[in-house]
Image (cartoon, rainbow, N blue to C red):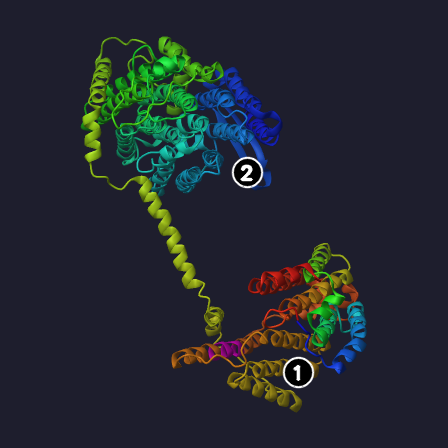
Amino acid sequence: MIWLLLVVHAVVALGVAVGATRLGRDAFLVAAVAPLLAFVWLVARSGVALDGGITEQVSWVPSLGLTLDLRLDGMGLLMGLLVSGIGVVVLAYSRWYVGDAPGAGRMAGLLVAFAGAMLGLVVADNVFVLYGFWELTTVASFLLIGWEDQRAPARAAALQAFLVTGIGGLSLLAGLVLLGQAAGTWSLSGLLADPPTGGAVPAALVLVLVGAFTKSAQVPFHFWLPGAMAAPTPVSAYLHSATLVKAGVYLIALLAPAFAAGVGFWRPLVLGVGVATMVWGGWRALRQFDLKLLAAYGTVSQLGFLVVLFGAGVPALTFAGCAVLVAHALYKAALFLVVGVVDHQAHTRDLRRLDSLHRHLPVTFAVAAVSVASMVGIPLLFGFVAKEAAYQAIVDELGPARWNLLLVGVAAGSVLTVAYGARFLQGGFGRQPVAPGGHDLVPPPPRAPWTALLPPAVLAGCTVVLGLAPGLAAPLVDGAAEALLGGPAGAGGGGLALWHGANVALALSALTLVLGALVHLARQPIARFQAALPHGVSGAQAYQWCLRSVLRGADRLTGVVQHGSLPVYLAVTLVTAVALPIPALVAARGLDVSLTVAESPLQAVVVGIVVAAALAVAVARRRFTAVLLVGCVGYGVAVLFVIQGAPDLALTQLLVETLTLVAFVVVLRHLPDGFRPVRGRGSTLARVVVAGAVGTFVAAFAVVAASSRTVPPVSVEQVALAEPEGGGRNVVNVIVNDIRGLDTVGEVTVLVVAGLGVIALAAAVRPRRQAQEVTDGAP
Amino acid sequence: MERPEGSPILEVGVRAVFHTALLFSVFLLLVGHDAPGGGFVGGLVAGAAFVLRFAAGGVEEVRAVIPFPPTALLGAGLVVAVVAGVGAWSPLVFDTGVYLIVIGLVLALVLSLGGAPDGGPV
């Protein structure tokens, strides 16, 4: 049944994209049917999924052994509910935000397609299926970021996201293949149940981690995510905060329980990257004036937090990670949708220009306040519950220095989270004092309609409900953690609860809040400090440099290889053709070569003429003379064919030689009369050497090949077959058209291509008028 | 631009020979299975006939006989040859495809490169 859901997504996506013009803004409502169906089905089957999981195998190409392995377990259920639920909300919001804009159908279709791909990713049980859906989400993200394809910044951002996550995807594939080979199975559940060890496994894990880090915007690959804010707000809310960027985290969550303890570098690498990302994202967020960019850097920071929680491979932390996953999806998506409302109503996202929106957009402010409060960890909200679980889990591990450091890092990141959350709320909705020489404040924006506010309000409502009654989320979070760990989570400190009692974790939360508030109050000096810091190389700059270098290198290589000089091309081709078979020739040294010089005096005379003509070509001064002499060589060979008794060959050779002569003469009219004098002795010597080498080689090769026959020639058999099977007495014709007919098909294709090439090249150098005449026919 | 004077002997001679040569090329195509001939040779003879016409009267003369672009012959010939070759139809049909392709190739050469050296019509 899962695969049916995926098919439904695909069909709806196509239908909406195609039927867009008639539907207008309702395309989004139609599109929402697919994720809604998925959500309902997942809820209905949640009992079975949490109990033991649902597995499906859809046989796709039996002859190749390709099957679609799908598995719905607790983690898949959690992610699937997030993807589908938030998908419905975002699509409903888009109906208001995008409205009847051209391309609305395309966006709706792409959003549904993405939802299907993401759903497929989280239920995939086969390494290749996972990779396939992974790249599908990359493509969907590319198309959605560049949705406003007339704008160059959108295109550049889309390309950047695509290149970074795409290259990461390739790294992921390489790593997965290595892991699968080491484990002897392509099944994910099989791989995780019995993790492989051995030489290739560490390298494979690094490759997989690179893929996960690029997808989840970890340092140093984080720069594509703020760039992706060029996308319309619904896209940012859905893909780049709640779902797509979680794919890397999901992968780390799957692998960590199996590999974290066993592989030496896993914890230092993953936790190090996670903490660095968490702190760096928060630090950069404090510098932003655009609300959307602020939220984006906040997402980067939160993804770092998730990587830390899942990457440790410790049951309590994994449990906390599942809780934070849900909490983050709920509040971050709501925040992005709020930014969209502000942008739509006030036509700006610059917090220096927004004034007192808490009065003008009260409901929006309420939703934003709830979401920010959840993000910073204020009690009675689900974000607080999740963060408490996280703190408690880390505190339980305290002792070794590494864990203390980790706690410090996570705490620092949380402090920054509080600070930028306050920045968001105050800057976006608070009172803005008018600074002399500062930015113009926007006039009070109109109230937003309920169609705009209901979707984010629903998300905020979930945050409140789950915060007050965390037991509602407990089975889901428990089930997810169990599925990941392969056993009960044994959640530290008694699972999710509103109140654990006054313990270290609570103290830490309080401390975080206080410090964060202080950082926010001190924002002016901190801003000055940040501005004064030397700017290192940013990830975006490194990316630009890489891109420019690749393009420059390609240009240079083309300049060398595509020289433009005909003698050089010819020389390279000939030398390669000569050099490659030389090993075969050398190996034939011990061959018994039997040669007959000539079979009749007539042959000797003809060959003598041909040789003389060939030598004369080399010393001819005029092009015309040289061409005629080449024709002589051709006619001489035709005469040889006649002497040998091959009428078809002789006829063809004579005609081809004549036509070639004509073609040469026709072209020669466009060229100067004499050959261009060759510059320098070195050039002449090179040409003599190459020509001599080719000629010698061909002669030697012909002699050796003729003497190397070890089995009877094929032609004997074909001649015998010609009349009875082919029905014809002209053996040459029967062989060419019948017995080896497919070879001839290939050859005539070459002829056609040559003809088209001549037409195209001639047209390229002509004035346009005449080029039209050639292709159109008579004037 | 005026046409350069052609030799009257050549013009008359070509007029006499042209149609015969075309007939001969079709003949070669048809008898190819049992006697020397076939699609390649037939196409070359027909191509030679067109080249003679070109020598006599330039590109205009050739266009007068073949008003459509040579790519049509190339394409039609390729379709016939591929379908007949892959589908293992009668060798004569296959040969006809080859015949058309060779004529198309020669015409492509002559018509593309046969214009006047300075880019004028003849």
Query: Where residue A66 is drawn, which disc sits there?
Result: 2
What residue span does the magenta drawing correspond to?
A692-700
Question: Residue A428: where, in percent of width, then height?
Answer: 33, 21
Q: Is residue A378 left or right of residue B36?
A: left
How many numbered circles does the render carry?
Answer: 2
Label 2 in the same subunit as label 1: yes
Q: Chain of mark 2?
A: A
The kind of residue tagged 2 is: Leu
Is residue A54 magenta-colored? Answer: no
Label 2, label 1: how far apart the Cα atoms are = 59 Å
Q: Which image quadrant is residue A459 in?
A: top left
Q: Give A196 or A40, whichever is nearer the viewer.
A: A40
Which numbered disc, 2 or 1, marks the residue that appears first in the sequence? 2
Question: Residue A429: where, in percent of width, then height?
Answer: 33, 18
Q: Give A756 or B13, whichever is nearer the viewer.
A: B13
Question: Residue A529: where, in percent of width, then height?
Answer: 19, 31
Query: Where residue A640 is drawn, which disc sits there?
Result: 1
